[in-house]
Amino acid sequence: MEYKTIQFEVVETTNPYGWKWIVFLDATRTRTGIGLTRADAVLDAELVIEKVLDSRRSNAKETSSNNSSRS
């Protein structure tokens, strides 16, 4: 699956019962978690993606602000 250009997977587990989600941030970094239902797992994965994208945006803004103030 994909959300805002970031790939993630949701897989049903049997022991313990639930749904595991895996978000692929880049070639070496992932985030994982477990939801009780498939919908919970998808929502959790999407929330993690939102958080990561917000963090990237704020880091980019700080970097550009720091570069602008040095000029």
Image (cartoon, grey):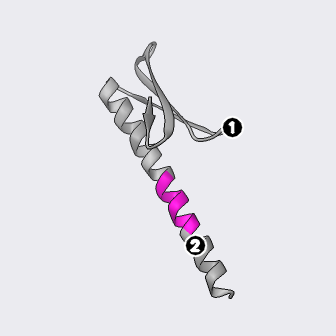
Q: Quadrant of the C terminus?
A: bottom right
Disc 1, SS: loop
Mark linked to residue 62? 2
Q: Quadrant of the N terminus?
A: top left
- The amino acid type, in three-letter code, at marker 2 is Glu
Q: Nearer the viewer, residue 35 or 2?
A: 2
Identity of the residue drawn at 40% across and 40% down? 46
Query: In this rendering, is residue 67 above or below 20?
Result: below
- The amino acid type, in three-letter code, at marker 1 is Thr
Q: Is 61 displayed left or right of 35 in the figure?
A: right
Q: Nearer the viewer, residue 41 or 53?
A: 53
- The local crowd at label 2, few if under 14, some if 14 to 19, many if 20 or more residues have their Cα within 10 Å, is few
Q: Position of residue 64 (x, y in %)?
A: 60, 74
Identity of the residue drawn at 45% across and 44% down? 48
Q: Earlier in the sequence, mark 2 or mark 1?
A: 1
Disc 2, SS: helix
Q: State the residue position of label 1.
A: 28
Identity of the residue drawn at 46% across and 13% down? 15
Q: Position of residue 9 (x, y in %)?
A: 48, 26
Q: Is 66 displayed left or right of 41 in the figure?
A: right
Identity of the residue drawn at 44% across and 43% down? 4
Q: Residue furthest top?
A: 14
Q: Nearer the viewer, residue 16 or 34?
A: 34
> Are discs 2 and 1 less than 8 Å apart at CB?
no
Q: Position of residue 70 (x, y in %)?
A: 68, 86
Q: Position of residue 12 (x, y in %)?
A: 42, 16
Magenta residues span: 53-60
Which secondary structure dominates the residues rendered in magenta? helix
